[in-house]
């Protein structure tokens, strides 16, 4: 019990003292997750909108697949990227395994289905409402996409946040493709696993606290933003 | 008011509907319908709820494709706009809503805001230009929708029960707007179940009942000498089922 209390105090000291190891890990984690979410959003939002606007053979297969992939276990995503990028794999020549780039790819695979599937639902709802008006104005489906994405923006913030939550919280994928190399590919979640198994509870706990507060902070900011906008825009 | 000789001239192509039928999930919602609309008239589509008024307008405007028959503009399709019962406005300011419509129809960027402001002014919305469109009152929203249609300079304007959810002052504003469109030479096709509105506005009346076009006559004739028992009952104020 007193050990835990000590660990908590030490963790606070590490955070407040901006321990360079800790800061390095936090910055790398944010870089990787934010990059992955950004790329996944750039692909996933238009993809979700397209799925909401067009019906084609195989449409429901894609929708079901995306929904299923929302629950893809991170280790499976990690393993797939590992096989792809390993020396003997089809993309082995890129030499990307155990680099932050590989971790970004793995997280994109985890986040993209969430963003695309949830964006599809949001845009579909709005499309029902806007369809006749936009058609009457003479817009093609393709030109409706930016309009719908922009008008669904309040809901889509939450969608992207859900993606960020998944990216920053998962450990299995980045562990496999990143390798948890100190100073190169060590992020918050993999460091927590390592430090816990080593018995270095203060650092593990400190990282856990930072991770928790970061996620809380990002969510609070997004919530405030969308609430003010909602009140303003009606 | 209903004197045909004073109607403004228009070169909007006539609309020809031949045997237009609409079937949805095995149910025939519109019986084969023939219709010819020309000139710059104000046609009111009348009838009880579920008569097929909205359906007819959507088919004519091209939002729906008929199950059988054809909708045909003689010559070229005209510039058209439609105002809906519940205005659909984008989640941005009143001004931005109008600028958006101008952007869609290819107006150069520098002309959009000035023209949008003129339209806001014309429809008494100048003070509200920065307000988000979706927090405006029902009447203001409908006027904004009319201002948007105005900017598209339509040759044919469809209005689907534009006043059914509004109070008398807002109804007056919408009817005045319709009159302005008319003066500009726009052909009006508007659905309503308000007989007084038809008396005030219409040059001719299309009377629908249970998916059938029952009468298409000048307003005067419709009210003084309706040919069908359904129209007589409707005018008397009986419940027409």
Image: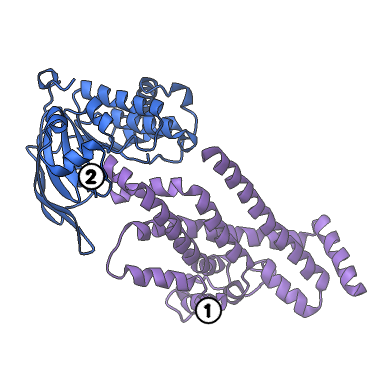
Q: Secondary structure at mark 1?
A: helix
Q: Nearer the viewer, residue A142 or A228?
A: A228
Distance CA(mark 2)–CA(mark 1): 56 Å
Disc number lying in front (2 or 1): 2
* Badge number at residue A128: none
Where does the image place residue B63, in percent across and percent down from the top left?
24, 47
Q: Residue at x 40, y 39 (%)?
A: B89
Query: Would residue B119 be found to the left or right of residue A218 on screen?
Result: left
Chain B, chosen colour in render: blue
Answer few, some or many: residues within 10 Å of disc 1's Cα (few below 14, many 20 plus, some between 14 and 19): some
Report whether residue A138 is seen.
Answer: no
Report whether residue A115 is seen.
Answer: yes
Please, which residue is most extreme toward the top here?
B6
Q: On the image, numbered disc 1 is attached to which residue?
A: A76
Q: Residue at x 35, y 70 (%)?
A: A60
Where does the image place residue B181, in percent across and percent down from the top left?
25, 25
Q: Nearer the viewer, residue A16 or B6?
A: B6
Marks 2/1 in contact by CB < 8 Å: the verdict is no
Report the coloring of the rendering.
by chain
Q: Chain of mark 2?
A: B
Quadrant (top left/top right/bottom left/bottom right) for the N terminus of chain B: top left
Q: On the image, numbered disc 2 is attached to which residue?
A: B53
Q: Secondary structure at mark 2?
A: helix
């Amino acid at each position: 019990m007193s050990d835990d209390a000590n660990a908590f105090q030490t963790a606070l000291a590490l955070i407040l003292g901006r321990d360079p190891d800790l800061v390095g890990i936090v910055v790398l984690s944010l870089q990787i997750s934010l990059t992955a979410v950004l790329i996944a959003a750039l692909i996933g939002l238009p993809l979700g909108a397209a799925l909401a606007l067009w019906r084609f053979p195989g449409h429901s297969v894609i929708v079901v697949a995306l929904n299923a992939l929302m629950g893809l276990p991170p280790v499976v995503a990690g393993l797939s990227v590992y096989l792809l990028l390993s020396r003997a794999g089809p993309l082995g020549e890129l030499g990307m395994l155990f680099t932050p780039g590989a971790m970004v790819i793995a997280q994109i695979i985890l986040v993209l289905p969430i963003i695309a599937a949830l964006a599809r639902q949001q845009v579909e709802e709005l499309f029902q409402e806007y369809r006749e008006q936009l058609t009457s104005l003479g817009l093609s489906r393709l030109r409706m996409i930016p309009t719908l994405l922009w008008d669904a923006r309040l809901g889509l913030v939450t969608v992207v946040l859900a993606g960020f939550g998944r990216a920053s919280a998962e450990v299995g994928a980045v562990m496999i493709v990143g390798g948890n190399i100190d100073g190169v590919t060590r992020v918050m979640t993999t460091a927590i696993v390592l430090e816990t198994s080593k018995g270095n509870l203060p650092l593990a706990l400190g990282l856990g606290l930072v991770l928790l507060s970061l996620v809380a902070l990002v969510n609070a900011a997004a919530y405030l933003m969308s609430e003010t906008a909602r009140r303003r825009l009606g | 008011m209903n004197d045909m000789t004073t109607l403004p001239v228009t070169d909007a192509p006539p609309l020809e509907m031949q045997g237009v039928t609409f079937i949805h999930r095995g149910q025939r919602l519109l019986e084969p319908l023939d219709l010819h609309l020309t000139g710059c008239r104000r046609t009111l589509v009348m009838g009880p709820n579920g008569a097929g008024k909205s359906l007819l307008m959507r088919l004519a405007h091209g939002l729906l494709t008929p199950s059988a028959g054809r909708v045909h503009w003689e010559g070229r399709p005209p510039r058209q706009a439609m105002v809906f019962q519940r205005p659909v406005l984008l989640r941005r300011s009143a001004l931005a809503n109008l600028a958006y419509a101008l952007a869609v129809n290819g107006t150069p960027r520098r002309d959009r805001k000035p023209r949008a402001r003129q339209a806001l002014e014309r429809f008494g919305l100048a003070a509200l230009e920065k307000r988000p469109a979706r927090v405006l009152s029902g009447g203001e929203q409908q006027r904004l929708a009319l201002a948007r249609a105005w900017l598209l300079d339509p040759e044919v304007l469809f209005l689907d029960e534009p006043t059914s959810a509004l109070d008398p002052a807002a109804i007056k504003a919408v009817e005045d707007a319709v009159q302005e469109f008319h003066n500009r030479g726009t052909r009006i096709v508007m659905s309503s179940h308000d007989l007084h509105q038809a008396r005030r506005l219409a040059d001719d009346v299309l009377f629908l009942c249970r998916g059938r076009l029952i009468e298409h006559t000048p307003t005067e004739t419709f009210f003084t000498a309706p040919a069908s028992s359904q129209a007589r009952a409707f005018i008397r104020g009986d419940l027409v089922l």
